[in-house]
Image: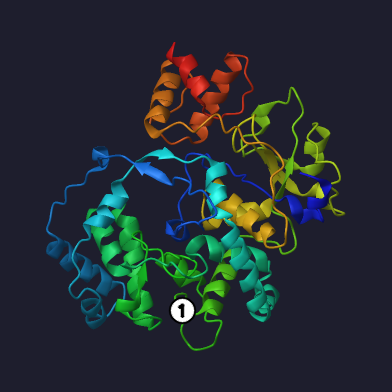
Amino acid sequence: MPPSLFPRWQSRQLIAASSLILLVACAEKPTAADALPLPPAQPAPVVTVPNAQADTSSDIQPVQTFAQWQAGFREQALQAGISASLFDRAFLGVTPDMDVIKADRSQPEFSRPVWEYLEGALSPLRVRNGKRLLEQNAELLARLEQRYGVDRQILVAVWGMESNFGQFQGSKSVIRSLATLAYEGRRPQFAQDQLIAALQILQNGDIQPDAMLGSWAGAMGQTQFIPTTYNTHAVDFDGDGRRDIWKSTPDALASTAHYLQSSGWKRGQPWGFEVQVPAGFDYWQADGAQRKTVSQWLQMGVTLPAGTQLPAGSNELSAALLLPAGARGPAFLVLDNFRAILKYNNSSSYALAVSLLGDRFSGWGFIGGSWPKDDQPLSRSERVELQNLLNASGHEAGNADGIIGANTRKAIRTAQQALGWPADGYPTHKLLDSLRR
């Protein structure tokens, strides 16, 4: 990228760092806004191609009817302080939603690579709409910055990613979805906790049951809060006595700002920036958990693009190095504000999209490095096969579940090192083919 695209520190923000980071290409969580079509000028990237069959390994056979479960849960809700009349009104006519079960059990076989995910997330239409809303809500955003210390561009970026600026919030009954998941889902206790929290929201009078709509997983409102997060961080910023994240933009954005503030956001600090990695670099350092000061990374040979200057004091900020597409793709140093975004959604591709979208509103946020577009991500079944082959080779990838976590990345690194390749921990078809022999 030319130096003109680096007007200041924030001009090169990009990508994830945390020991809990999921592999960018394989583990993104789609947001509500991703269900909307891209503008016609953009080629529509494929989101996922689900398996033709549900994942039978996670099939759950309830040992009781839904009515029996509801009766037992009613007692628990009453013990938690929910009134009997509120519970009965909220559950009036509620039956299990099999579309929710199908969504909960589905295991997508194919995931789009990070560069395609970003192409959709950063569509020109979304950028234009974000810029317009920044201007229209300037006074509100200034008050939010003052109150919570979270930069306005990031708030609007989260708003855009989660619901296309409030246009797509999900249309399913939150009570019905969570009741279905508590009765027959993979994580019944989690769903039950969310359902209690949802009933508490209703009892508080913030919204009526028929208006409490959201995603199949129970995420709600313009910035897609789950009920427990709503109870701890939702804010009545417009002063009408209700925390309305569905129809009140001030409440929705203030609630998001409150959450990011509690997650450690530091106003005015960058979230990260793109760097160049020298030849012969020790890629073991790029595992997301290795944190050093910016100056220490620079001493190791990591360099900034020509013309980039960092503000005074930034060299001592803590950073991690991440290669979202392996050694062949762009490299980034990421800082504490990126970790705050990851607490909102622990997907590095999501956090990357939010960060870049915030930058695009100010005219930068473009990636200088090239993506390895000839190397598509492994499918789920190929990731499972890779893990099995790594385990058979003594590299200890752990349970072969198709999820590229810390153990699998470490196993990939050891296998790559044994082959004399850059040990970047990135799963490729080349590595899979090598282990098949």
In which quadrant will I find the N terminus? Answer: top right
Side of 165 where 180 appears, left or right: left
User: Which residue ends up furthest to the top in the rendered image?
Assistant: 437
Residue 127 percent coordinates (x, y): 61, 61
In this view of the protein, can residue 345 be seen by the observer? Answer: yes
* Vertical placement of residue 283 versus 212, above or below: above
Q: Nearer the viewer, residue 75 or 286?
A: 286
Q: Residue at x 13, y 65 (%)?
A: 67
Report the residue that reaches farthest toward the bottom: 240
Between 44 and 212, the one nearer to me in the picture: 44
The chosen color scheme is rainbow
Residue with the mark numbered 1:
247
The residue lying at 52 percent from left, 35 percent from top is 406
User: From the image, which quarter does the C terminus lie in?
Assistant: top left
**Along the viewing direction, whichever of 118 and 415 lies nearer the viewer:** 118
User: Under tag 1, what secondary structure?
Assistant: loop
Instruction: Residue 210: give x, y in percent of width and height.
Output: 30, 77
* Residue 237 to residue 4: above or below: below
Q: Position of residue 430 (x, y in %)?
A: 52, 20
**Extreme residue toward the front, this view:** 41
Looking at the image, residue 306 lies above or below residue 339:
above
Badge 1, how many Cα within 10 Å: few under 14, some, many 20+?
A: few
Could you say where residue 334 lies in the image, as x and y percent from the top left? 68, 46
The reply, left or right, for residue 314 in relation to residue 88 is right
Regarding residue 24, the answer to whether it shows in the image is: no
Which picture quadrant has residue 289?
top right
Image quadrant where residue 36 sits: bottom left
Total numbered circles = 1
Q: Identify residue type, mark 1.
A: Lys
Horizontally, is 368 left or right of 165 in the view? right
